[in-house]
Image (cartoon, rainbow, N blue to C red):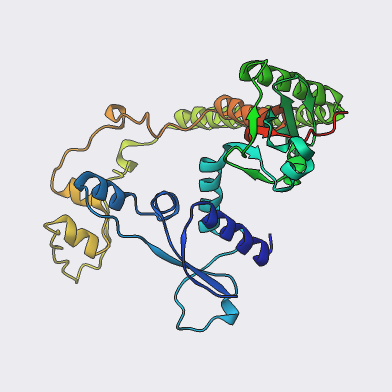
Amino acid sequence: MNQQEVRSYIERYFAAFSTHVVETHPHYLTVKLPVEVDKDIGNRPFYWSWVEKMNLPYQPMVLTFIFQPDQVGTDIRGEQIHFGAQRLQQIFQSAANHGRFVCMYEHHPAMLSALGPGARRSNPLTPWLGLNVKISLICDKKKDLLLYLGVNLYQPRVVHNFYPFLQRLQLQPSIPAYYYTQAQTISLGQAVGLLEQEINRVIQQQDSRWATEARERLHDELEILEAYYAELALREQTKDEAEQSDETEEEAVNIPVEEAVDENRLVVECPEDKVVEPVALPTSIDEVRAGGGRLLDFLRAHSIPETPKSKINQGEWKKSTPQEEKKRRMEELRWQYEPRIEVTMINGGIFYLHNMPPFH
């Protein structure tokens, strides 16, 4: 969407809620938000919870949307809005929440005059169920198919491109004068069943090579993963055998007792003519940290007992085994490459029409 399309959409969005426009300018728009819009895009849920709980009067929020920031002076305070902006995403979501289902009637001033002398008699409007559906073919790639389906609820039949047909009509939320609605001969559940059959037929007509190719790519990735962990297991086995061999050699060496050195004792050699003064040990951990010393040495010097490693519960820091890591990565690959089909209903509504869409 370019900036002109963004502005057109925002203006239609606010017009649908009868929003008070404070100021309109070629480069920006200032509006006072109504309650429904403020709750959706105002980003102040705590304010609304407080107002509703205390039964206080509502203070409307005023927002300024800037569409051409390079053409607006510094005296205009507002937020720049463009396709991809967070505020525009909130507006999209709000429009989807409030306008996902509608009930509209065909309403055109020329309809009565076109009926001739009997224009004052009642004329029927045929009920239709219209749904816009998205079919997603998903693997490591994705393809979306959009279907604009309509079902005649009086004489059951399914038509395609129903929404483009509706765009050519003038629709209003109220029934026009001298018109009545025909009764439905099928329920909404039966109509949805007809749409499901049509969606399944469209899916079956799609070329299935995308799924076959996705499974082939999944098979190749799994083979690479198997080869990697097989090599990793071989390296770990070789490493363990080498460590065991080194331990055996160390046990075979006899070390004289008088040559053994306590690893916890530090031996410092100094000339005989120099007197080594004892070094004062730090009395607090903060002194150790300030002097850059080791905390373990401080604990040992003050006879603070250490907790043996065998008594430390290290379950939270346990490293994943290669088998667990392999299983997790295989699940991730299957989620990424395994072909699947998702069907999502975008929006829909009941439409009472005088004109009939073409049926193929």
- State the image coordinates of residue 116 (x, y, percent, origin top left): 79, 39
Question: In what quadrant of the picture does the C terminus appear?
Answer: top right
How many numbered badges does the structure rendering display?
0
Quadrant in the picture for residue 33: bottom left
Question: In what quadrant of the picture does the N terminus appear?
Answer: bottom right
Q: In this view, does 246 lie to the left or right of 193?
A: left
- State the image coordinates of residue 180 (x, y, percent, origin top left): 63, 29
Furthest-front residue in this view: 117
Quadrant in the picture for residue 3: bottom right
When the figure is inspected, residue 120 is found, relative to residue 288, above or below; the finding is above
Front-most of 261 and 17? 17
Front-most of 70 and 149? 149
Quadrant in the picture for residue 159: top right
The residue drawn where x is 19% and y is 71% is 274
Front-most of 107 and 258? 107
- State the image coordinates of residue 213 (x, y, percent, origin top left): 84, 30
When the figure is inspected, residue 25 is found, relative to residue 336, above or below; the finding is below
- State the image coordinates of residue 58 (x, y, percent, origin top left): 29, 55
Q: Is residue 147 visible?
A: no
When the figure is inspected, residue 295 is found, relative to residue 152, above or below; the finding is below
Front-most of 140 and 308? 140
The residue drawn where x is 68% and y is 36% is 120
Q: Is residue 120 visible?
A: yes
